Image (cartoon, rainbow, N blue to C red):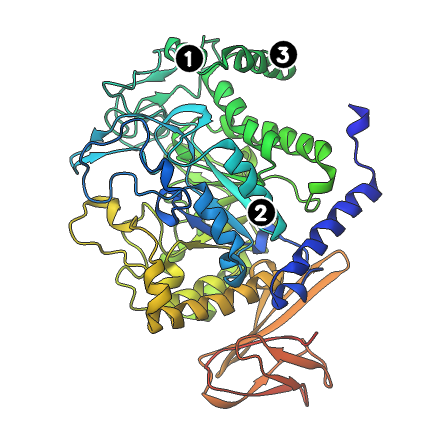
């Protein structure tokens, strides 16, 4: 093991390698190659693997999934190679994205089920059949390896989506897991802690007994499957090694933790988003994080030239209905749970879409105060639309510019749901339930529609500004002027200092922006939105542009 240790100089070389790689990117990125990646200010792109981009048509149909489905409830062809192609094209660079989270890619149930909305297949990735394998509809492990390497070459982190709470539904082809692994009832009523965790989310979605510490054997169907695939001996050997190293009992949750953390150890992914977190025993996630950290550290030791920086592995919790106002706790009514202290760096903020109805200063000051107060050291992931939220901020896409401005300039992490930036419709005729949120990415509109291109450009400018300035998402907010509305963000980490001034709802043409104490007189500054440059005089910056937004940064 000693031969894999990373001395300081080797780590520094790895960071240098990462920085020099970015020199092949856009001019904007060249200028900020020394800007540290700060998770608390990340710009995260969330996409549904099957609905984003089809990079390999040969895997569009696997496991004989040919039955007629409800509208937008079957596989549509998106895959890992499709995501990688968009990384190659620079789509995410232009959008200022520095982390991509995509829906689960593990092998799904082979058949489909009718949930009252027409037949559905596991295109969304949340119906696992075999956590140790990728679903061929999404691609291969070689595809995943290539994607992570491409992303890292562009300074983009990869977040996988991890499900530990449940298996996939039971079908004629997909057998139920043994009863010492899962429960098949009762259905959750969410009235208290027990009736949220020790129950099934919906009928026919077997719930993993995550509270169990009892030894269980591998399911017979999985043993048979692995033998047919010629990997039974290797898989069992690895499991033996995992349980010997950790000392964990062979309980259901620990098998799944082993399978999920393999993707870290093998490919160097940078984070996990935990699915349906509040429906499991919370201690599962503390153990999960411990093994994630172990796997990530090992990957870094084994791949010293591929290490991007010294950031630790990052975890995001989906605790349905958690809001930033709740601070560190989620209240079940009869019990409060602190998920930040059970393995998570971040929680998805279901409150943001409501706060986005308010004015800029209300949002920005509220989030800055909480994130630099009770949640200091942690963060939240803000979103305005998602794959399973039927009440998005702007379902009809009539406020795309406002949505981008509020999301991308708010403290915390931003979640750009695929198509937010291009006004992809969230109202699709003929769909039922959450299918309306999950249409294929509107690439044709991006190519041909001037209005779509205008919307995209707005999101790109704001996204690049956020990416280039950790102060935007991770800094301290301070209002400078209420009319016209201007504010500053400042961020310090070690020797790195980042300061910006932003003006919103500004007059078109000539505008004078008070910069307070952020930029001294004589400082040359640039408006990242218009590209115009000026020099600070008497505590003010004079910008003449056709836009109502000013994003002031130091001219480099």
- Of the two numbered discs 2 and 3 on the same chain, state the one appearing first in sequence: 2
Evaluate whether residue 70 shows in this view.
yes
Evaluate whether residue 345 shows in this view.
no
Q: CA distance from mark 2 to mark 3?
A: 34 Å
Q: Residues within 10 Å of mark 1 (few under 14, many from 20)?
A: few
- Please tell me the numbered disc located at residue 534: none
Q: Are marks 1 and 3 in contact (CB under 8 Å)?
A: no
Total labels: the figure holds 3
Up the image or down, 177 lies above or below 429; here it is above
**Residue drawn at x 45%, y 41% as measured from the top left:** 80
Judged by depth in the image, the label closer to the viewer, 2 or 3, is 2
- Of the two numbered discs 1 and 3 on the same chain, state the one appearing first in sequence: 1
Q: Which of these two is toward me, 375 or 8?
A: 8
Q: Which of these two is toward me, 237 or 142?
A: 142
Up the image or down, 122 lies above or below 220; here it is below
**Residue drawn at x 43%, y 21% as measured from the top left:** 210
Q: Residues within 10 Å of mark 3 (few under 14, many from 20)?
A: few
Q: Give the image location of residue 266, x and y in percent.
A: 60, 30
Side of 422 where 155 appears, left or right: right
The residue at which mark 2 appears reads as 150
Q: Give the image location of residue 199, x and y in percent.
A: 31, 24
**Residue drawn at x 56%, y 50% as measured from the top left:** 374
Q: Which of these two is toward me, 243 or 202?
A: 243
Up the image or down, 378 lies above or below 335; here it is below
**Residue drawn at x 55%, y 31% as measured from the top left:** 263
The residue at which mark 1 appears reads as 228
Q: Name the quadrant containing residue 102.
A: top left
The residue at which mark 3 appears reads as 244
């Amino acid at each position: 093991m000693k031969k894999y240790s990373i001395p300081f100089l080797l780590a520094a070389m790895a960071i240098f390698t990462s920085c020099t790689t970015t020199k092949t990117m856009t001019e904007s990125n060249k200028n900020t190659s020394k800007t540290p990646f700060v998770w608390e200010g990340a710009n995260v792109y969330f996409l549904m693997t099957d609905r984003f981009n089809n990079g390999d048509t040969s895997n569009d149909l696997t496991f004989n999934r040919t039955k007629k489905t409800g509208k937008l409830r079957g596989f549509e062809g998106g895959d890992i190679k499709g995501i990688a192609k968009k990384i190659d094209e620079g789509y995410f660079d232009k959008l200022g994205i520095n982390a991509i989270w995509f829906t689960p890619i593990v092998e799904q149930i082979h058949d489909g089920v009718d949930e009252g909305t027409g037949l559905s297949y596991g295109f969304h990735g949340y119906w696992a059949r075999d956590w140790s394998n990728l679903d061929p509809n999404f691609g291969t492990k070689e595809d995943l390896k290539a994607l992570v390497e491409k992303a890292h070459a562009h300074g983009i982190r990869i977040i996988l989506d991890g499900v530990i709470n449940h298996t996939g539904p039971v079908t004629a082809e997909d057998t139920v897991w043994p009863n010492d692994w899962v429960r098949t009832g009762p259905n959750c009523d969410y009235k208290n802690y027990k009736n949220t965790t020790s129950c099934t989310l919906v009928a026919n979605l077997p719930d993993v007994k995550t509270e169990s510490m009892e030894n269980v054997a591998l399911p017979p169907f999985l043993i048979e499957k692995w033998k047919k695939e010629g990997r039974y001996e290797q898989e069992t050997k690895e499991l033996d090694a995992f349980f010997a190293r950790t000392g964990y009992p062979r309980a259901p949750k620990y098998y799944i933790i082993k399978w999920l953390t393999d993707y870290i150890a093998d490919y160097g992914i940078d984070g996990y988003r935990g699915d349906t977190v509040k429906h499991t025993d919370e201690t599962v996630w503390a153990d999960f994080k411990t093994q994630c950290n172990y796997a990530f550290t090992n990957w870094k030791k084994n791949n010293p030239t591929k290490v991007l920086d010294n950031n630790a592995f990052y975890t995001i919790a989906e605790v349905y209905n958690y809001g930033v106002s709740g601070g560190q706790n989620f209240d079940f009514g009869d019990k409060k749970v602190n998920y930040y202290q059970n393995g998570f760096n971040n929680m998805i903020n279901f409150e943001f879409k409501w706060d986005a109805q308010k004015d800029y200063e209300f949002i920005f000051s509220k989030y800055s105060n909480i994130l630099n107060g009770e949640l200091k050291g942690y963060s939240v992931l803000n979103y305005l639309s998602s794959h399973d939220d039927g009440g998005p901020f702007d379902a009809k896409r009539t406020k795309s510019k406002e949505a981008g401005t509020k999301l991308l300039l708010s403290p915390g992490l931003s979640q750009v749901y695929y198509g937010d930036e291009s006004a992809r419709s969230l109202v699709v005729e003929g769909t039922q339930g959450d299918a309306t949120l999950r249409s294929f990415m509107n690439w044709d509109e991006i190519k041909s529609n001037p209005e779509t291109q205008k919307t995209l450009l707005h999101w790109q400018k704001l996204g690049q500004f956020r990416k280039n300035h950790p102060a935007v998402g991770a800094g301290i907010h301070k209002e400078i002027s209420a009319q016209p509305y201007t504010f500053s963000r400042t961020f310090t980490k070690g020797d790195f200092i980042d300061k910006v001034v932003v003006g919103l709802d500004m007059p078109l043409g000539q505008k004078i922006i008070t910069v307070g104490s952020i930029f001294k007189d004589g400082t040359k500054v640039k408006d990242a939105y218009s590209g115009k440059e000026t020099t600070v005089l008497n505590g003010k910056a004079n910008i003449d542009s056709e836009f109502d937004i000013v994003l002031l940064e130091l001219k480099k």
